[in-house]
Image: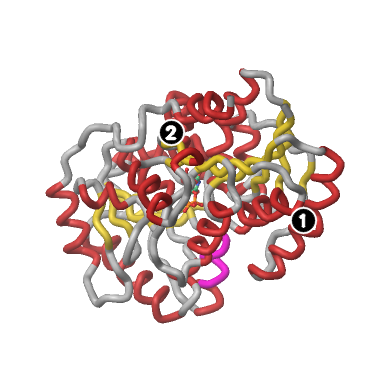
């Protein structure tokens, strides 16, 4: 069985690690195509090395373009590769432009499509990710959902029950697979910084960084939290770094370059609190028994809010970050870990493919 996997962004490399191993274990032949959406070594190569991902069959050069230009270039570049491989199935993860480009190419080449992390909805159509999710789901033969809520979302949209399989979260599989290898490295800054309470912050979502007012508000709130509550450690996404420079905004916190997954897992083990607009990190905070402030007005991972593991901080409202963060630190109780399965999503996916 030949499977073409289209990946291109950091979270997809992480999600693919346990699934690639599961595919290999049952003898599937996987051809990984890296679109180059994320291309910096620290956003890409580090994950292939640390997680021993399969060497890509092809690496495209589709980074650093507007959404439309990126989708169009991915289409042009993916076509001959699909034609050369003649896969039996195509596999995509999550909600990025690479997800959608892979899904569209599968349809164009008549290749049955597998969507891992299907059914998630923020119901915010201003997010490009929401468009990517909805269309990728529509093009899929196999819809592997992480939660019952995601399965329900698909059923409400009229997807057939037969196409939907709730398998849990492949990111939990990854975390369980790699957490014993978590490690501090000097790239993160001195080890002594992490010995005292600190907050781990990441921020990169288009809706948070694309407007100077909204990014400026978030920068002021994070700086104030850093000065008045506890030091902030922030591995800075390259897209955020560009916008901060462009808008003349200054973070006064402890900045690091983007770090590898094993470093992130280590930071998660040490931190007091997570502040993030990342989908993946919201769940990793929960898996690591850490309270989380989600720097958005809504989330696809609604269960985390409902069970009190995370709280929303909507930058469109004039709330203050400090009371929101203090509130979740004091109310947080480490809960059961079974909201997103038991860390066997990859095996469930492979089993369902038959
Ligand atoms: N991550 C990482 N290094 C970093 C920041 C994040 O390894 O410097 C990991 C993080 O632990 C999670 C994933 O990247 O597993 C989340 O990716 P990202 O926030 O880019 O995307 P999202 O989850 O929002 O789609």
Q: Vertical placement of 5 versus 70: above or below?
A: above
Q: Would you say the magenta stretch is mainly helix, strand or loop?
A: helix
- In magenta, the rendered stretch is 238-243
Does the magenta run of residues contain 54? no
Asked whether residue 45 is in view, the answer is no
Residue 8 in percent (x, y) is at 65, 49
Q: Secondary structure at mark 1?
A: loop
Residue 127 in percent (x, y) is at 47, 67
Residue drawn at point x = 47 percent, y = 35 percent: 170
Which quarter of the figure is the N terminus placed in?
top right
Question: Of the residues tagged 1 and 2, which is closer to the observer?
Answer: 2
Q: Secondary structure at mark 2?
A: loop
Disc 2 residue crowd, few under 14, some 14–19, many 20+, Cα 10 Å = many
Q: Nearer the viewer, residue 12 or 164?
A: 164
In the image, taking residue 104 as reference, residue 19 lies left or right, namely left
Residue drawn at point x = 13 percent, y = 48 percent: 331
Residue 263 in percent (x, y) is at 48, 38
Does the magenta run of residues contain 240? yes
Label 1 vs 2, first from the N-terminus = 1
Asked whether residue 33 is in view, the answer is yes
Tell me the number on the disc at residue 114.
none
Q: Quickly name the residue at label 1.
A: 61
Q: Vertical placement of 89 versus 213: above or below?
A: above
Q: Quickly name the residue at label 2.
A: 167
Mark 2 sits near ligand 1, with its Cβ under 8 Å away: no
Which quarter of the figure is the C terminus placed in?
top right
- In the picture as drawn, the residue positioned furthest to the left comes out as 331
Disc 1 residue crowd, few under 14, some 14–19, many 20+, Cα 10 Å = some
Residue drawn at point x = 39 percent, y = 60 percent: 122
Colour pattern: secondary structure
């Amino acid at each position: 069985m030949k499977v073409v996997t289209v990946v291109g962004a950091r979270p997809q490399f992480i999600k693919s690690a346990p699934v690639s191993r599961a595919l290999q274990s049952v003898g599937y032949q996987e051809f990984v195509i890296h679109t180059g959406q994320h291309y910096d070594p620290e956003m890409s190569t580090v994950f292939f090395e640390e997680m021993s991902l399969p060497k890509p069959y092809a690496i495209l050069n589709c980074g650093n373009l507007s959404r439309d230009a990126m989708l169009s270039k991915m289409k042009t570049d993916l076509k001959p590769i699909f034609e050369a491989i003649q896969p039996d199935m195509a596999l995509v993860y999550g909600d990025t432009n690479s997800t959608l480009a892979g899904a569209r190419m599968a349809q164009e080449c008549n290749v049955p499509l597998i969507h891992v992390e299907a059914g998630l909805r923020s119901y915010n159509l201003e997010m490009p990710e929401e468009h990517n999710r909805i269309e990728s789901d529509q093009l899929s033969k196999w819809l592997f959902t992480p939660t019952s809520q995601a399965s329900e979302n698909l059923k409400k949209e009229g997807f057939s029950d037969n196409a939907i399989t709730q398998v849990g979260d492949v990111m939990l599989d990854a975390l369980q697979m790699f957490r014993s290898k978590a490690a501090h490295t000097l790239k993160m800054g001195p080890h002594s910084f992490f010995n005292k309470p600190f907050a781990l912050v990441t921020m990169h979502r288009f809706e948070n960084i694309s407007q100077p007012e909204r990014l400026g508000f978030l920068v002021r709130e994070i700086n104030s939290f850093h000065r008045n509550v506890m030091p902030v450690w922030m591995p800075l996404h390259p897209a955020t770094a560009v916008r901060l420079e462009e808008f003349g905004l200054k973070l006064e916190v402890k900045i690091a370059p983007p770090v590898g997954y094993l470093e992130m897992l280590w930071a998660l083990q040490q931190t007091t609190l997570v502040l993030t607009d990342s989908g993946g990190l919201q769940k990793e905070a929960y898996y690591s028994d850490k309270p989380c402030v989600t720097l958005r007005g809504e989330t696809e991972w609604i269960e985390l809010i409902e069970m009190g593991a995370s709280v929303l901080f909507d930058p469109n409202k004039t709330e203050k970050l400090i009371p929101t963060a203090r509130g979740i630190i004091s109310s947080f109780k480490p809960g059961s870990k079974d909201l997103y399965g038991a860390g066997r999503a990859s095996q469930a996916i492979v089993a369902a493919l038959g």
